[in-house]
Image: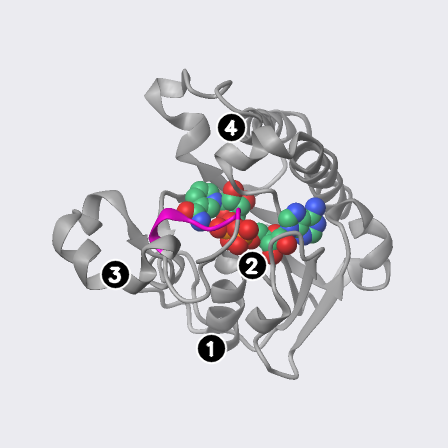
Amino acid sequence: MRNFIIVTGGAGFVGSNLIELLLKRTNLKIVSIDNYLSGKKKNHINNSRVRYINSHTKNISKILNKIKKKIHTVFHFGEFARIYQSFLKLNECIESNSIGTHAVFNFCVQNKIKLIYSATSASLGNSGNDKNLSPYAFTKAKNLELLENLKKWYNFKFEIIYFYNVYGPRQICKGDMATVIGIFENCFDLILHNLDFDSNFRCVQKLLKLYIVDSDGHRD
Ligand SMILES: NC(=O)c1ccc[n+]([C@@H]2O[C@H](COP(=O)([O-])OP(=O)(O)OC[C@H]3O[C@@H](n4cnc5c(N)ncnc54)[C@H](O)[C@@H]3O)[C@@H](O)[C@H]2O)c1
């Protein structure tokens, strides 16, 4: 029985919100793999069905070897996730988004596990012409390209979630990995009155609910 869900980046912003939702919507066990590059232990969701493993995604095959036949889905959100900072931390970006991500893709292909991956407007914007503007955009665009090829070569099953400027609980508010909305969190009323949230920003919890089907097959 495939009763495990893997969330890479489970101690990060999107990953922790996903774990919270999966606990409400499914009865499955959840394993987070996070190297705490930008994730925090304070983002852990306290529940006996969740196990947090501190590791880089490049070790995924070794870490999950014992349960590889029991995995239902891998949600791969454990990547270096900032545009400007990817110029300053090129090595971390390539290590996570290329080396780590290729290990995750390979693990899923080898074990016939469905993958959910997050795309970004940074690599799709301007009709795809922005894909070489930063190390972050470049690595994410190459990963999408690889996924399309894996589908052709191995009939690999995957889905892409598109996050554009999502906001919500546990977003990063301080330090060099903070997001725009995170930085202005304390002025939230001001932002709500001045930005078009429907077209420019999306609440992470509302967005994730669109993708997660509960055990009765319902989704929001
Ligand atoms: N937040 C957004 O607006 C947004 C927009 C577009 C795409 N995305 C994508 O969504 C995903 C999650 O982004 P986020 O905003 O939650 O970022 P985040 O920085 O809050 O979370 C990323 C998590 O992944 C972990 N991580 C990074 N590299 C890792 C590695 N090699 N091994 C294990 N763990 C690793 C970090 O420690 C962190 O906990 C990313 O792939 C990002 O590109 C986010």
Question: What's under tag 3, amino acid-wise?
Answer: Cys
Element on which disc 4 rests:
helix
**Residue position for label 3:** 187
Q: Earlier in the sequence, mark 2 or mark 1?
A: 2
Q: CB under 8 Å between callouts 3 and 4? A: no
Where does the magenta region start and end?
176-181
- Quarter occupied by the C terminus: bottom left
Crowd rating for badge 1 (residues with CA inside 10 Å; few <14, some 14–19, many 20+): few
Distance from disc 2 to disc 4, alpha carbons, whole Å, reads 19 Å
Please indicate whether residue 63 sits to the left or right of residue 151 in the image.
right
Numbered disc in front, either 2 or 1: 2
Please state which amino acid type lies under the numbered disc 4: Ala
Q: Is residue 39 left or right of residue 17?
A: right
Alpha-carbon distance for marks 2 and 1? 19 Å
The image position of residue 140, as x and y in percent, is 55, 31
For disc 2, the marked residue is 12
Q: Amino acid at mark 2?
A: Gly
Question: Which of the 4 image quadrants contains residue 48?
Answer: bottom right
Instruction: Determine whether, in the image, residue 113 is placed left or right of residue 142.
Output: right
Relative to 52, is 199 above or below? above
* Label 3 secondary element: helix
The residue tagged with tag 1: helix, strand or loop?
helix
